[in-house]
Image (cartoon, rainbow, N blue to C red):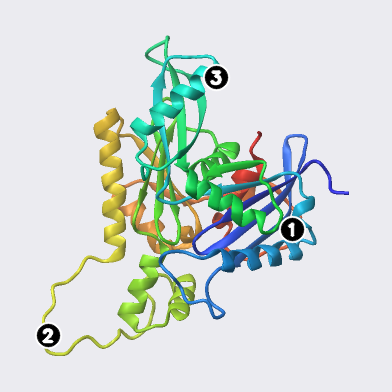
Amino acid sequence: MLSSKVRVGLDIGSHSIKAVVVEKSGNRFKVVHRAVRPLWGGGNVFDPDGPKRGQIVPQLMDLFASFKMAPKRLKNIRSLIAGSQVAAKEIIAVPLEDREMASAMLLEARKHIPLDGSDTQVDYQVLGEHHEESDKVRVLLVASSKKQFEGHLQTLKEIEVRPTVVDIEPLAYTNSYLAFNDLPDEGLVVLVDIGCRKTSITLMGRKDRFFTREVPVGGQAFTDELIKNYGLSWEEAEKVKAEQGLKPDLPKADSESGELRLASKSTIDRFGEEVNRTLRYYVKETGQSHFTKFVLVGGGAGLEDVRDYLANKFNASAEVYDPFAFMDVTAENGGGHPSQYAAAVGLAIREV
């Protein structure tokens, strides 16, 4: 009989699946299982459009088998959705009764959160009173397209799972960080989630507006640059990236002889420009420009080149977040970098 205290956080990404199983004891969490399952390689050629359901389901089955758990018997599985048809925005609203607030938030989502024009799945959370307007409240509005939401549920249904919570990626890794870290009294923390196809940048402060934005540069862009510069296969480039970083000790690939070409910006410079554009937009919208530190999460967080680049470019501290540093861990190392599990941990420890 599985304990009612068992919680599963399941992060199905574009590159891999991450899962964490925790048990709560008092105010502490114990990690009893953790694992990463890659979705590419072993005969699956990387597709920039993302993995298909036929790739995801077998890996989910294998993952739960390694935990010696039957998914359909688990009563508390939390999962997340991510992508261009998922968004979050903080707005200011008049406090209302629950039913009225839910109706109002559906209308607000259509005004504030651009999706694809199709039916929208909306949720919200009241963050508290507005510090300048006492008759208003701060509300975090979250939305996804209904098509993406239902597609995610259908994937999980293939292994007989009905999740108790479906969250969005920025909130999952933010919850993970906030569970173990205090925000500064002044200024903001910049969470940088470096995924496969994109990077999510989330800004949060004790007194400041929550903001999150996706930028179209992720770990795959760094892999593509290694393939181009060094003539590597995709699997070779992934291995080099993990072991040697973005400037490996390898001979450059032959360039086209006798042809002058304009030098293109490096991927890391394009990445830096997108981060800078995000921060400048936030400053313009809010007037707040005090960014206390960068915290890296996600599969690309282990790249020292990226961490050092952000620290130097923005003259700020940059650190890699390890959620397991704050938990009791009895699980064997299931692979991957600890920062890869940030969102899965956030799901597993979230109070419903």
163 or 341, which is in the foreground? 163
Mark 2 to mark 3 CA distance (whole Å): 66 Å
Q: Nearer the viewer, mark 3 or mark 1?
A: 3
14 relative to 163, above or below = below
Tell me which label, 3 or 1, sits earlier in the chain.
3
What residue is drawn where x is 67% and y is 53%?
A: 20
216 or 106, which is in the foreground? 106
The quarter holding residue 104 reads top left
Element on which disc 1 rests = loop
Q: Is residue 286 left or right of residue 293?
A: left
Q: Evaluate whether residue 70 shows in this view.
A: yes
Tell me which label, 2 or 3, sits earlier in the chain.
3
Mark 3 to mark 1 CA distance (whole Å): 43 Å
Dot 1 crowding, Cα within 10 Å, few <14, some 14–19, many 20+: some
Task: Pick the quarter of the image with the C terminus.
Answer: top right
Would you name the residue on which mark 3 appears? 99
213 or 182, which is in the foreground? 213
The quarter holding residue 211 reads top left
Mark 1 to mark 2 CA distance (whole Å): 55 Å
Q: Nearer the viewer, mark 1 or mark 2?
A: 2
Residue situated furthest right in the rendering? 1
Would you name the residue on which mark 1 appears? 331
Residue situated furthest top in the rendering? 135
Would you name the residue on which mark 2 appears? 259
Dot 2 crowding, Cα within 10 Å, few <14, some 14–19, many 20+: few
- State the image coordinates of residue 79 (x, y, percent, origin top left): 61, 48
The amino acid sitting under disc 2 is: Glu
Residue situated furthest front in the rendering? 118
Element on which disc 3 rests = helix
The amino acid sitting under disc 3 is: Arg
Q: Is residue 37 left or right of residue 124?
A: right
What residue is drawn where x is 65% and y is 68%?
A: 58
